[in-house]
Amino acid sequence: MTARAVRFDQYGGRDVLYIAEVPMPVPGDGEVLVHVRAAGVNPGETNIRIGMLHDRFPATFPSGEGSDLAGVVTAVGRGVTAFAVGDEVLGFSWNRSSHATDVTVPVTQIIHKPVALSWEVAGALYVVGCTAFAAVRAVDPGRGDTVVVSAAAGGVGSMVVQLLTARGATVIGIASERNATWLRSHGVIPVAYGVGIADRLADAAPRGIDAFIDLFGPEYVQLAVDLGVAPERIETIISWDKAAELGTKQDGSVSASTPEVLEYMASLVAEGTIELPIAASYPLDRVADAFAQVEERHTHGKVVLIP
């Protein structure tokens, strides 16, 4: 009775990752054991692995990794009544453990998987879905507001722009030229990043910019301020130091990590109101390759592990 799980024993590049045989987890009180069918790969997991977030999120070695998951319940702990063996679920782990074949999860961190969701989409939903929800909530867009989004075609960005357009906002998405067609097809005005971006944004928003969501880096938080966006309507999910310096918002997935938000986002995807693009899927043994694609920072949608 063993499981397979991604591990790393020290901070470093993708070469520190390996697959370990570990004892099969046993669900405790209020937990279920999930046989993982899909687990999303997120940029933040790279930052944890290389030690960039040691002061904020230190690793304890040997460390597992992974938050997103979807799979089938194979055992339940004492006191669990809302889920049963055989249930298909999706959710999240806060123990850096979802990049594995089997994982225990508290029932407060899972929901029943809608039938309409593929395993890949269900297993990739948590981080991008809840982060996108939190980011949009932070700037509180109204109908007719003009909102700029950096990294607009990435995993979180793809969800953010769709949530914004659904609320009636005019959305300007900063992305590479190759993602312009997808953005336009979802009602987003594409603007290429790079030299001269301030002028291109001004041309795209002649009446001004009401809010700005940064999903890439501190230079965009500074750009938003320089363009005259009020700090209370600038949100970043990644540039915490810059946000503290300039007094902008810095809400992330933690503030929206509830079953209610996850169910809401899952329902939007299941009914086709928004889509979650899947860029690629990899078997667990190729976890390093999965991260190589994510770390290019040009992926459209999510990369998923299939244990």
Image (cartoon, rainbow, N blue to C red):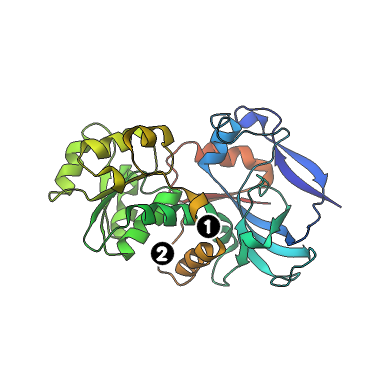
| Residue 213 seen from this side | no
Residue 278, image x and y in percent?
Answer: 50, 54
Q: Amino acid at mark 2?
A: Ile
| Observer-nearest of 289 and 196 | 196
Q: Residue at x 54, y 34 (%)?
A: 47
Q: Residue at x 73, y 52 (%)?
A: 101
| Residue 55 seen from this side | yes
Position of 71 with respect to 207 (left or right) is right
| Observer-nearest of 105 and 246 | 246
Alpha carbon distance from label 1 to label 2: 12 Å
Residue 283, image x and y in percent?
Answer: 65, 48
Position of 203 with respect to 242 (left or right) is left
Position of 146 with respect to 294 (left or right) is left
Residue 19, image x and y in percent?
Answer: 73, 40
Residue farthest to the left, as pictured:
206
Quadrant for residue 161, please give it.
bottom left
Q: Which residue is mark 2?
A: 274
Few, some or many residues within 10 Å of mark 1 (<14, 14–19, 20+) = many
Few, some or many residues within 10 Å of mark 2 (<14, 14–19, 20+) = many
Q: Secondary structure at mark 1?
A: helix
Q: Which residue is mark 1?
A: 125
Q: Amino acid at mark 1?
A: Leu
Q: Secondary structure at mark 2?
A: loop
Vertical placement of residue 171 versus 191, above or below: below
Position of 195 with respect to 53 (left or right) is left
Q: Residue at x 31, y 64 (%)?
A: 167
Q: Are marks 1 and 2 in contact (CB under 8 Å)?
A: no
- Count of residue discs: 2
Vertical placement of residue 177 versus 196, above or below: below
Looking at marks 1 and 2 on the same chain, the residue that comes earlier in the sequence is marked by 1
Q: Which mark is residue 188?
A: none
Residue 207, image x and y in percent?
Answer: 13, 51
